[in-house]
Image (tube, helix red, strand yellow):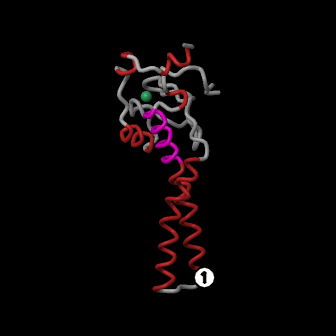
Amino acid sequence: MDTVTAARTWTQQQASAEKRDVWTAMKRGFFCRCPRCGEGKLFRAFLKVDNHCSACGLDFTPHRADDLPAYLVIVIVGHIVVPAALWIETHYAPAVWLQLTVYLSFTLVASLLLLQPVKGAVVGLQWALRMHGFDENATDEISPG
Ligand SMILES: [Zn+2]
């Protein structure tokens, strides 16, 4: 039996690993806080995740949010704007220039406002599920870098 197979086997040490609540971690990430302690800031710039938590020292570098936050924001904003646009068009039919001004402005502002919280929630989800490098028991099979 090689070491990779042995590392995937259930052990007492893995069973007693720290419990990570998915919703709490996602909520803390949504509010741009560390998914583990909820105190330290998650971001050092608009969409730049900090290297580690300033309060508890959790290493954030293993996160791999990639494009998922952008896809989720498109889904969320699209499910607000499209039904609203259809309903307003069928009931009031305002001028096209007015509709475009309102819908495009709302889409831009809502997307910018949601992008950071959604990315924080995705990082919280990855931490809670021990994805990528957030699993301290993981082998070096997949390099986080
Ligand atoms: Zn922390």
The answer to whether residue 69 is above or below residue 10 is below
Q: Quadrant of residue 63?
A: top right
Picture coordinates of residue 137, whole percent (x, y):
48, 20
Overall secondary structure of the magenta stretch?
helix
- State yes or no: residue 119 in magenta: yes
Picture coordinates of residue 51, whole percent (x, y):
56, 28
**Quadrant field for ligand 1:** top left
The answer to whether residue 137 is above or below residue 49 is above
Choose between 8 and 124: the one closer to the eye: 8
- Which residue shows up at 49% across the image and 65% down it? 79
**SS under mark 1:** helix
Q: Which residue is mark 1?
A: 96
- Which residue shows up at 47% across the image and 33% down it? 127
Picture coordinates of residue 62, whole percent (x, y):
56, 29
**Boundaries of the magenta span:** 116-129
Q: Quadrant of residue 112?
A: bottom right
